[in-house]
Image (spheres, rainbow, N blue to C red):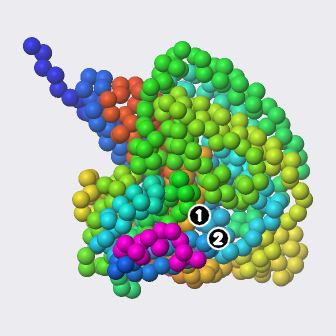
Amino acid sequence: MADQHRAVVRLREKFADSVLDVKEFRGEVTVTVKKEKIVAICTFLRDNLKYNLLSDVTAVDYLGSEPRFMMVYNLYSIPNKDRLRLKAPVAEESTVVDTVSGVWSSADWLEREVFDLFGITFTGHPDLRRILLTDDWIGYPLRKDYPLQGPDREPYQGRLS
Amino acid sequence: MASTEFMTVNMGPQHPSTHGVLRLVIELDGEIVRKVTPHIGYLHRGIEKLSEHRTYHQIIPLTDRLDYLAPMSNNLGYVLAVEKLLNIEIPERAQTLRVMLAELTRLKSHLVWLATHALDIGAMTVFIYAFREREKIMDLYEKLSGARMTSNFFRVGGLSNEVYDGFEKDVREIIDTFPGHFDTYEGLLTQNTIWRQRTIGNGIISAEDAVDAGITGPALRGSGVSLDLRRDNPYSGYEKYQFTVPVGEKCDTYDRYKVRLIEMREAVKIIRQALDSLKPGPILADCPQVCYPSKESVYNTIEGLIHHFKIASEGFPAPEGEVYQAVEAPKGELGYYLVSDGGNKPYRMRIRPPSFCNLSALERMSKGAMIADLVAIIGTLDIVLGDIDR
């Protein structure tokens, strides 16, 4: 079914060599694309396929596998009432992605949060500062190698109770 | 010749009209706002990080503490996401009760919005009245779950207990009396000259701008965009209920006020329909790997005790995959993005907070406004810092 999804068909036509993977799980379609093309693909999805609401931007840290990070964009189309998830792998050596805040301005704060908690930087972002943590915070808490109880602490062993 | 210079004023984080620990740095030209820079994170508890170290059931109490004015809506979004990941069916009674409780929660949340928003603009009476009515729902919460705010009532697969005797009577009393209370609020505000002057034309954001800024919920509908996930992507049996989705026209604070008041009336209608269709039946899915056993079997049988212990200590493994489940929380789209690696804890849990995205539009909405109107704009966005900071 994922192959017939309207966005997947159009993306495969238009960005044939940038679409890395298409998956469907529990009725949700996920398209993995190359991070270099993320702005072009997002602009195309917004303008041609009416994905006008960027619900969410986040990242996942797959520590130990290559590439380490995965950017995740959850899109919603208000006219068509459907969702699409876009993912883009980001290697540890170069944690830089182009910003999509020019496509949807809601990405502004959401990308700041990803920067704050994962340490992924966004080129072209208008105001890339930490958002939840203080400016002098060291480390990126949502990375898997950041201990739960804070820096310089033993890794969490589970609750004692 | 007098010279003019801009003044930078700090507002918050301890300020009654910022609705929590929000800090704003405002650049002022006289009384006109030139620039607002929100500083958030004072209530950051790292719930997303904590969730990676908790079993699926242990995360439910953490979700109560997101938007602490609407705990059951947070619970609902989370349990639906886990149930989607596990692909389990929920019995009809549990679904109906969840809808009722989610709508009662919407009433509760909107009452706080109305109370504090009106108080910010100077209408003290509405504040007292709305909190009086909210107390009715808090009492119901307390009878139901033992807690007034952090209810922790939902479970993966259903609900934690059967409702108490007399629950239906209490709910019916609420839905019978509340429309009259809404009339009182409207009588105090809708035609009130001060209220109208403070809200009409305040905080205008066009439909395109609102969508672009990621605003959802009543704040978006006030700008004329008809998006309601309960109707557009129904979950938990919302497709069975008749309700209208109000939208505004003028995109201002007054229209958002009217939208929320109509929503409260619609919520009462949904609760009434749910109450009328409520039938006896199980409140937990028939899925012993996931659901807690009944208290009766835990206390009286060794199998039940072991079963309870296994679920409480080890939890249950979830299939590998990723899901995103969004619900129409009182403040907007509340989404949970769960990534599972096949273990008994989520590999990653991301919460898409409605207030966070709504607040990001504050600067756009308040540019050129008077500083006193900035307070009205914060009120109309209906933010909760527990939700923004997580």
- Is circle 2 on the same chain as circle 1? yes
Location of residue B335 (image quadrant):
bottom right
Q: Residue at x 83, y 55 (%)?
A: B163
Read off the residue under disc 1: B325
Q: Residue at x 60, y 17 (%)?
A: B191
User: Compared with residue A137, is residue B54 higher up or lower down, i.e. above or below?
Assistant: below
> Mark 2 touching mark 1, by CB under 8 A?
yes
Mark 2, Cα crowd under 10 Å, few <14 / some 14-19 / many 20+, is some
Outermost residue, left side? B1
Read off the residue under disc 2: B84
Location of residue B29 (image quadrant):
top left
Between A148 and B270, the residue placed more toward the observer is B270
Q: Residue at x 62, y 79 (%)?
A: B318
Q: Position of residue B208 (x, y in %)?
A: 43, 44
Mark 1, Cα crowd under 10 Å, few <14 / some 14-19 / many 20+, is many
Secondary structure of the residue carrying numbered label 1: strand
